[in-house]
Image (tube, rainbow, N blue to C red):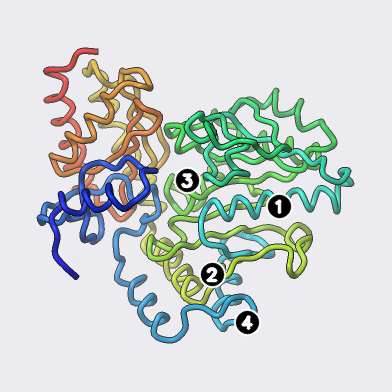
Amino acid sequence: MTKISSQEAMALEDKYGAHNYHPLPAVLERGEGVFLWDCEGKRYYDFLAAYSAVNQGHCHPRIIRVLKEQAEKLTLTSRAFYSNRLGEAEKFVCELFGYDKALLMNSGAEANETAIKLARKWGYTYKGIPNNEAVIVCCKQNFHGRTTTIISASTDPAATSGFGPFMPGFQVIDYDNLEELDKVLANPNVCGFWMEPIQGEAGVYVPSEGYLKGAEELCRKHNVLLMMDEVQAGVARTGRMLASDWEDVHADILILGKAISGGAMPVSAVLTSDEVMLVIKPGEHGSTYGGNPLASAVMIEALQVVLDERLAENSEKLGAVFRKRMTKFAAHSRMVNFVRGKGLMNAVAINDSEDGSTAWDLCVALSKNGLLAKPTHGNIIRFTPPLIITEEQLEECCGIIERTFSEFEKNWTK
């Protein structure tokens, strides 16, 4: 590989790549554990973890070993044939999370699309909803992906502007509002309630205690499938294997992605019951790469690492450390409005409007001081490090955040 500078790499992306992202000016070349290095060799703490895809840390040696071993044997067959790895991967993930059936795909968006199709087909097959009249209820400020179907349920203008016409069949309600949910689920044409247990892209919005359990009970009451998108909040990120585990909620359709491969492969999964999964017959849904042998092997090892290294426990413990320290700092800061989160899925809200630049400028300053984080919704900074981080490393990173914010605040005017 030709060695290039950070400036050269950014120039190449700008000239030849689509401008559908606005990255921080850090060009990353190597990763290990909680660290990333740029083209010039500068080291950073990673406090984004690829939007929680690398909960196990960058290039975890166990995951990479399995990746290499399987890559030398067989990478892809398509689903035209069986493979020796898919069945064992399906069994592993079903037994781990308590479901009958699994359907492996590639991206979180693909998994959510799969869940939509399953819920609709179940509604027509078992609930007796008239054909083409199924409704899926979803929440304001949701983020489930960027396909044209998924953005049809979005309330974010950045996701929808210029991309219509949109698919019908979605009803959008307030998040964290059981009274409204009860009313809309009474519609006999509703087949599913599609939600995130914590809204990550919305700024790590944690619902009121009892909301998830209440939603589950209302879905049972109205014979509606609870569709839980744990692509970002799942796999130990919040201090439990699933964020919905905090309220002992068992979704009818569980949607997983990101960290189920430890960042080594695009892998996602939809888990559900025999009744729901088997509404889809051969030829009605699929993906050439979905459930490929390489992805299957990687997923098993990535999830086993989470269990063996007790990453959920570490996330719960260190998340409390982070919030306590950041909350104490916020009490004496003009810039910080509040701190919120669960486990190591946390956000710091900056005292600025959503269209302000303060959070972005702070993230640029943090990167110069050796820590990578990214704003969401304009004035909110997510802090989501790999779950393998130690308490000593976390305390060092809190120090970087406090020093950066304090220095920035000296010259800051709202």
Q: Check contact, mark 4 vs mark 3: CB within 8 A.
A: no
Q: Nearer the viewer, residue 11 or 168?
A: 11
Q: Check contact, mark 4 vs mark 2: CB within 8 A.
A: no
The crowding category of the residue bearing disc 4, from other C-alpha atoms within 10 Å (few below 14, some 14 to 19, many at least 20), is few
**Residue at the spot 50% in from the left edge and 35% down from the top edge:** 159
Q: Which numbered disc flags the more N-terminal residue, 2 or 3? A: 3
Q: Position of residue 49 (x, y in %)?
A: 33, 50
Residue identifier under label 2:
289
Q: Which numbered disc flags the more N-terminal residue, 4 or 2? A: 4
The crowding category of the residue bearing disc 1, from other C-alpha atoms within 10 Å (few below 14, some 14 to 19, many at least 20), is some
The crowding category of the residue bearing disc 3, from other C-alpha atoms within 10 Å (few below 14, some 14 to 19, many at least 20), is many
Q: Which numbered disc flags the more N-terminal residue, 1 or 3? A: 1
Which disc, if any, is residue 233? 3
- Total marks placed: 4
Q: Nearer the viewer, mark 4 or mark 2?
A: 2
Q: Amino acid at mark 1?
A: Lys
- Note whether 372 is above or below 404 in the view shown: below
Q: Check contact, mark 1 vs mark 3: CB within 8 A.
A: no
Q: Check contact, mark 2 vs mark 3: CB within 8 A.
A: no
Q: Amino acid at mark 4?
A: Tyr
* The C terminus, quarter of image: top left
Q: Check contact, mark 4 vs mark 1: CB within 8 A.
A: no
Which disc, if any, is residue 384? none
Spatial distance from mark 2 to mark 3, Cα to Cα? 24 Å
Q: Nearer the viewer, mark 1 or mark 3?
A: 1
Residue identifier under label 4:
82
